[in-house]
Structures are given as structure tokens and as C-alpha cells.
Image: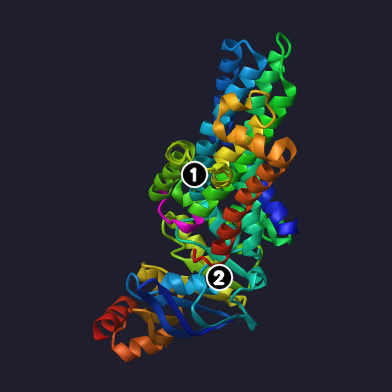
Amino acid sequence: MVHVEALTKRFGPLEVLKGVSAEFPAGAVTAVVGPNASGKTTLMKSILGLVLPDSGRVEVLGEPAINNPRVREHIGYMPQDPRFPENVTGREVLAWIEELRGRPKARLEELVERFGLAEHLDRPTRFLSGGTRQKLSAVLAFLFDPEVLILDEPTAGLDPLASSRFKDLVKAERDRGKTVILTSHVMSELEELAERIVFLLEGRVVFSGAVEALREATGETRLERAVARMMEAV
Amino acid sequence: MKGATAKIFKYTLYDLARSRWVLGYAMLIALMVGGLLLFGNDPTQAVVSVLNLVILVVPLVSLLLGLMYHYANRDFALLVLTQPVPRASVFFGQLLGLGVALVGAFLLGAGAPFLVYSLIGQVDWATLFVVLVVGVAITLVFLSLALWLGVREEERVRALGVAIGVWFLLTFVYDGLLLFFIILAQAYPIDPWVIGISMLNPVDLGRVLVLLHLDTAALMGYTGALFKHFLGTALGTALAALALLVWIFWPAFFARRRFEKKDF
């Protein structure tokens, strides 16, 4: 479970988060949606500790998370555009992160097989295509079986097979009680995966709750329509 | 060194050891030093020529390679920062890794030609030793400056521009202005001031350190002669070395502070 309360963040003159409070329960996929520059990535990065909020609280599994690197033991993260040290192979990157975490790579074989990554692991990462780097990033995020998964546009660049396998994996993790926080521009993907929505607009939460409730509130059955209606309404 | 710092140091070094840029730098230095050795005839003069190389090329390459690595690895730093690792470990691990890689490339590039040359000619080992120490210190000073610049500036091109400006200022403009000042004020007892002003420039400090150990100090520059005259070799060396250490640490200190508070 992840809990954020009254988060504010300013980048120079730009107020990106204006008192964001939201709940990301365990055993559910919560999508963070909103137009470009609404604060989605800043919110996710605040949970990860990459962005330091000006005020407010972040709790991960009940533990305060700001300036607390230890909580990241429980977080797996897929960034929008993952990159790795150029001269190093995928296998080495995996070994490094394993060493940094000080825990064995619990699910390596299963994940490598799921994403068909075996043949790419021994090449320097600078030779990997965007999609393959994305797969490597997925393996890293799930590798240590973390309680919390933060996935920022995770399927961008994945081929249809990898993408559908990825979505199956996310569902399985949710069913195992994991907290999944997700952004995506692909509405059909959110429709398939998310049961909860946190809707951000200009740094404020304008809706937070079950997807069903959003549909009812807007009178639209399709998620894409419902989201578009929310954007228009405010 | 704490566990996480040591690990990140190891990864940074491992990555850099395979980098074509670092290898290219070592070869560039080796070619230039080899050329100086072949075409010079006096062994001490060869070492002094290497000093000039150290003073011009090493700061520029340390700045540029430090910045390039910083920007090329921002995304990897991001990945590491999402792991249960304190920010300070990420910063120091990278700083140390870069430091060891660049120092290694410099020592290899500048030292190996002398080793080969010693088979056929005479080498002034004592002076060479001082020049190498100065080269190492200058490498670390400019790497430390590069990281500070990199951590502060999001835009690579602007950072590279500032770096080249800083290099030009410290290697060329500063001495010109100092000379101008000396000529303007030649009627006054300004020598202690000149010593003070030189200590504000790491490049001058490096030069002074080497010149203090040469008999021909006066031939190689006014400030070197001044240091020798006013402070003597021992005190002059100690002061210049201390000032160089300060130059290594202060940019790194501010870089680290910025890194801790930065948003990624």
C-alpha cells in the first residue's frame, strides 16, 4: 500500500503538485491519468524519492518514504525510457542490481523466458533496441518480487506479444496482493488493467476512486470517453 | 567506503574501463609524450614539456570526459537511485570511479613512454614524479569541477560551453591578467599578492609545484620564482599542495550537496 498526503512540488515558477493526496491500495492496479504535464510523473517520482516534495507525506507500506532509501527495497520501477551503462551487458546490469539490493534475483529465469530476453543478455546494452531495453527494465522491476510496482508507460515500445505477456504478469501480481501504480497513454490498456483511477489535472486530484465510479460520475461506459469528459468538465 | 559506494565505484570503473573515450585519452597522451621525448634531447626539458601538456590538455579532457560521462549516465544514475541506495553513495561511487579511470589513463599515457624511453635514453625520474603527481591532482580538480557543473546544469551543451570557458579562463586568460597586473604595479611590493592570486588558480598551482623542484625555476615563470624566493621549496610545496587539495574538495563538496537535494 502507498499513501500520499498533501504533496506539493514547485519547479521554479511552476507549481506541479498542488496538495496531492491519494491512496494506492494493495491488491489493485491504480492508474494515474491526466493530460500531459498534469503532474503524473512528478507524483510517481515523489513516491520513488527521485523528486523531493516541498511539503506533504509519502508512506510506502506504512513507512515514511521521503529521504528514506530503505523503502525502495519494496519498490520495483519501470521508467518511461530506460537506459543502462553502454559498455555493459544486460546480464551484468542484472547482477549489479542484485548486488546493490543484497538479495538474490528471485525470478530471473521465469522473467527472462517470459520476455524472450535470453539471447540479448550477453550483448552490451548500447546494441539493444528500445523495446529490448524496455523488456530488460521489466525484468528488473519484477526481479526481486517487490510489494509495490511503479510502472511509467511500461508497454510503450513493446511488441504485441511482449505487451500482452506483460499485462498478464501485471494482473498476476495484482492477484498476489501487490500494489501496482501505472500510467499509460493507451486507454484500452488502462481499461484492461486498472480498477482504480487517480485523475490529475494541473497538479490537483480531481477524481480518485474505482473505475466504475468514474464511469457512473461521467455517464460514459468507455474509459477513454469518461476520461475525456473529466478533462472537459474541469 | 560504505558498501553501496564501493559497489557503485566498481560498476563505474568497470564501465569506463571499456569506454573507447578513456582508452583514446590514454593513447592521445602517450602519443604526445612520445613525440616530445623523441624530438627533445635534454631529459629534464622533456619532462617540462610534458608539464605544459599536463597543464593544457589534462584540464580540458578531464572536464569534457567528466561531463560526458555524467550526461551519458544520467539514466543509469536514475536506475540506481530507484534502488535502496543513499544518494551520497551514488555520487561518491561515480566520482571515485571516474577519478580512478581518468587518473589511470593519464598515468598510463604519460608514464609508459618514459618507461620505454628509459631503455634508450636518460630520464629525469625525480622531476617526472612531480609532474605525474601534479597531473593526477589537476585531473581530480577538473573532474570535481566537471561534476559540480554537471549536477547543476541540466543542459549538456550549455555545460560543455561553460566548461570550455572555465578551461580557457584558467589556462590562458588568468595568466595574461596576472602578468598585466604585475606590469601595472611593478613599482609596488606586490610579490606576496602575486603568490596569493596564483593560489586561486589550480593550473598555476600545478605549474608552481613542478617549478619549485627545478633549478631553472626562474626560466619557467615569474610565479614559480616568487614561490621559491619567498617560501622556499619545502613551505612552497606544502602550501601549493594544500591549495590543490582544497581545489579538489570544494567543487566536489558543493556538487554532493546539490546532488542530495536535486530532483531527477
Characterize the local packing of mark 2: few (<14), some (14-19) or many (20 or more) Cα atoms within 10 angstroms: many
In the displayed structure, does residue A221 sit left or right of residue B245? left
Check disc 1 and report its element: helix, strand or loop: helix
Chain under callout 2 = A
Chain letter for mark 1: B
Whether residue A184 is situated above or below residue A9 in the rendered picture: above
User: What residue is at 72 percent from the left and 42 percent from the top?
Assistant: B235
In this rendered view, identify the residue nearer to me: B248 or B34. Answer: B248
Residue at image position (44%, 39%) is B168
* Residue visible at 61% across and 36% down in the picture: B226
**What crowding class fits label 1: few (fewer than 14 Cα within 10 Å), some (14-19), or many (20 or more)?**
some
Q: Position of residue B175 (x, y in %)?
A: 48, 37
Which residue is labeled 2 in the image? A48
The mark closer to the camera, 1 or 2, is: 1
Query: Which x, y percent locates residue A55?
Result: 50, 82
Question: Helix, strand, or loop for circle 2?
Answer: helix
Say which residue appears at 43% left-offset and 54% top-offset.
A159
Residue beneath label 1, please?
B68
User: Which picture quadrant has residue A186?
Assistant: bottom left
Identify which residue, A204 or A208, lies in the foreground: A204
Q: Please tell me whether residue B55 belongs to the stretch shown in magenta.
A: no
The amino acid sitting under disc 2 is: Leu
Quadrant that contains the N terminus of chain A? bottom right
Q: Which amino acid does the dot numbered 1 rest on?
A: Met
Question: What is the magenta range?
Answer: B150-156
Q: Magenta segment: does it hold B155? A: yes
Residues behind callouts 1 and 2 on a single chain: no
Q: From this viewpoint, which residue is outermost toward the front?
A: B187
